[in-house]
Amino acid sequence: MSEKNTADLNEIENRIQIACDIAEKKRSEVELIAVSKRQELQRVQAVLDSGIRCFGENQVQEALTRWLPLKTIYSDITLHLIGALQSNKAADAVRLFDVIHTIDRDKIAKTLSNEMQKQNKNLSCFIQINTGLEPQKAGIEPKQAVEFARCCIHDYGLSIAGFMCIPPIDDDASPHFAFLSHLAKKAGLSGLSMGMSADFEEAIKLGATHIRIGSALFGDRAY
């Protein structure tokens, strides 16, 4: 790993630790997901060389191309799907990923349940909540969150770890994080997938168990 990448990772780790201290949490209670979507392979390799084994991808096809070969080398990699999932990609998603963060509708919950049964897998899952009620954004409406979680667990047999959100880009993220935490407690769930490069410290202070960090760790993406 380059000196710059090492310095970036050390700084991120220091910031995570400070936020955990403020929140009176153990560092081990917060999972750092390195968001590798659209990153060059050499950058991903550098982060692997640093010892990180938890990665997040947005697109199933890109992830298959990248991680199927790498998984044969690094058997301890944990892959998180953090992007929207189409039903026709569910089989590949279940085959490749370890955690799904973006259950955002009944159809995809049912499809994932069927695929996991077919493949004899039981992946940990998060339900994406549209906390900003943005019409262009995927996610369950907050008023439906608790009942939808119950349906996923009891009707479809999914292992729901918690809720996930992506706050509106122009909003202060903190109220959305606090709201997601409130909803999760109502649903009896402990997992909170929230917080990215610009706001992960606030997310940790408000209960995040999984933070998704891309540009702060890898640098700007190649488009």
Image (cartoon, rainbow, N blue to C red):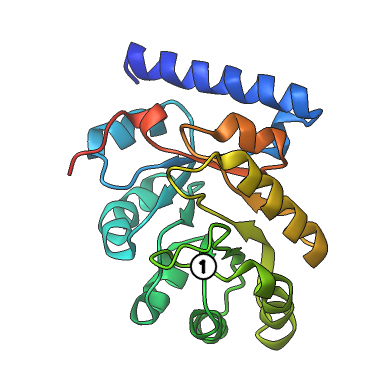
Q: Residue 46: image x %, image y %?
A: 33, 28
Q: Which residue is mark 1?
A: 139
20 vs 72, left or right, is right
Q: Residue furthest left?
A: 223
In-image side of 197 versus 160 (left or right): left
Give the residue displayed 65% in from the left and 85% down from the top: 156
Q: Position of residue 91 (x, y in %)?
A: 41, 78
For the N terminus, the image quarter is: top left
Question: Is residue 78 toward the left or the right of residue 1 in the image?
Answer: right
**Front-lying residue, 69 or 136:** 136
- Give the residue displayed 50% in from the left and 16% down from the top: 11
Q: Amino acid at mark 1?
A: Gly
Q: Residues within 10 Å of mark 1 (few under 14, many from 20)?
A: many
Horizontal and vertical percent position of residue 53: 49, 40
Above or below: residue 176 compared with residue 47: below
- Reply above or below: 70 against 197: below
